[in-house]
Amino acid sequence: MHPNRSVETPGVPLVEMRNISKSFGPNRVLSSVSLTLAPGSVHALMGENGAGKSTLMKILAGVHHYDDGEIECGGQAERIQSPKHAQELGISTVFQELSLLPNLTIAENMFLGREPIALFGTLDRKRMYEETKAALEELDLKLSPGLLVSELSIAERQFVEIAHGIKARADVFILDEPTAALNAADVEVLNRQIARLKAAGKAVVYISHRMDEIFNVCDTVTVLKDGRHVASEALEGITESDLIGLMVGRDIKDLFPQRGANFEDVLLSVQDLKLQADSPPVSFQLKTGEIVGLAGLEGQGQQDIVRSLVGVFKPDSGHILVSGGARALPLPAREGIRDMQRLGLAFVPEDRKEEGLYLGLSVAHNVGISLHSQRPGLAWAKRYKQQVTDAVTSMSVKASSKDTSVGNLSGGNQQKVLLGRYLAAGMKVLVIEEPTRGVDIGAKSEIYTLLRQFADQGGAVLVLSRETIELIGMSDRIMVCHDQAIIAEMQAAEATEHAILDAALSTSSEANERAAVA
Ligand code: ADP
Ligand code: MG
């Protein structure tokens, strides 16, 4: 084991960040945040997207400078100047955006900027190779130091970054959402390595959205919300819903509306949808009053399934039935979405700005736009005006007036306008991607309520979201995608993040076995 400060001076925190504030231009993203990293601890840093986690860690890593506050490393005040300076202070980082150079070998990356020179002024490749090998072996990695980084998987690249930190004798390891792109086996290897770092007296900061990992790996948690420090506590004795409550600033049961109860007529039926010629067929139904969530790891086909229903993605084959109207898939690319709208199915894409809203037009115009296309004519105009006013009122869109242009609204209010458009137009089925992306927590809750209202009024919602907690909270039923198929289905009231992740990670044969047993 390497000698390190932490073992020599137990009790002194490896890092103490006190009252750190940081603004980007006019936006204050951290307000007086404090964080203490003890030796031999794994510290979870939690908070919703945009809470300021990465910014706080980039300050510690020397990437950003802070405006106010102080940092001590090993009891000594430090003004961290640069990433290199942070490294010298023993701080090692694995960021979401990986920093290894793909065209260099593992060994070259490990020694970047600190290449050892041999006797005659040449690069000491042998030493590079051997030291790299030793660092990799310390992590039980069977990778040759001569491999190009571009040949490594994302997981392997992350492990190499950790090995890099070990080689540099770092005391503090920052892992910013390391598992977002990892499969189950790699997550396990990573967790073993974290346990090892902890046993060696290092401090690890672990940022992840997966609750079960947090509880498996971490001993302490700090929660941020809107750039403010909410809590720092030992994880022991804290429950998952306590944590979510701290993150969102209210009790989780107050965040989501009541689930639906009566699901009767089938509103949407998808039959034998095959994304590719050789993909398994996907069939499912949505009933009145029902919100159904689609979960899955990135790129397992869930988005293609959703987009096949509106002609944005071109699947191989299949059928779709919307309130009695049957169509063959693939739908025609341009006409598909309008045809679906006529049948009563509306689509709210992930990127609202690009695909959904007319930012230069007013709230009223945006809400009314699908009414226009439905029924032209003067007689309609008066009722139309009333409907727009009703919709804007019922959505509690925070705009100074309904004539405000949509481009000036917050993300949450833009989303509400988009939903209002379809509510006003009397749509039956809503297909929606990432409904609360880039939206603050108050608006999130309002959006969940709007979607539930839509369902309660006899509609049905198919929702795609990367936030598992959100899917569990807002849906009635959850379908999990893996490898272009729906491989598991569960009642949301009984679903856990763990069960969903488990299904999302498994091969289809395992999932089939599980389904057969259930
Ligand atoms: P988290 O990691 O918790 O999701 P971030 O620290 O990435 O949050 O972001 C916090 C806030 O700071 C967000 O509102 C984000 O848009 C903003 N932000 C982050 N980095 C920058 C930057 N380089 N310039 C301007 N704003 C930024
Ligand atoms: Mg982040």
Image (cartoon, rainbow, N blue to C red):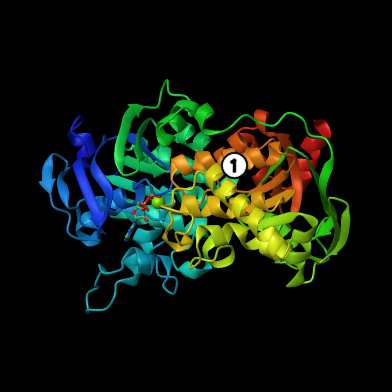
Q: Residue at x 49, y 69 (%)?
A: 150
- Under circle 1, the secondary element is helix
Left or right: residue 504 compared with residue 219: right
Vertical side of 468 occupied by 355: above or below: below
**Within 8 Å: ligand 1 and the Cβ of disc 1?**
no
Figure check: 90 above or below 500: below
Image quarter (top left, top right, bottom left or bottom right) of the C terminus: top right
**Residue 83: percent from left, percent from top:** 25, 60
Q: Residue at x 59, y 42 (%)?
A: 450
Q: How many marks?
A: 1
Residue that protrudes farthest toward the left in the picture: 77
Q: Nearer the viewer, residue 474 or 378?
A: 378
Residue at the spot x=26%, y=69% of the render? 113
- Residue behind mark 1: 450
> At label 1, which amino acid type do we have?
Leu
Q: In this view of the protein, can residue 469 be seen by the observer?
A: yes
Q: Is residue 164 left or right of residue 68?
A: right
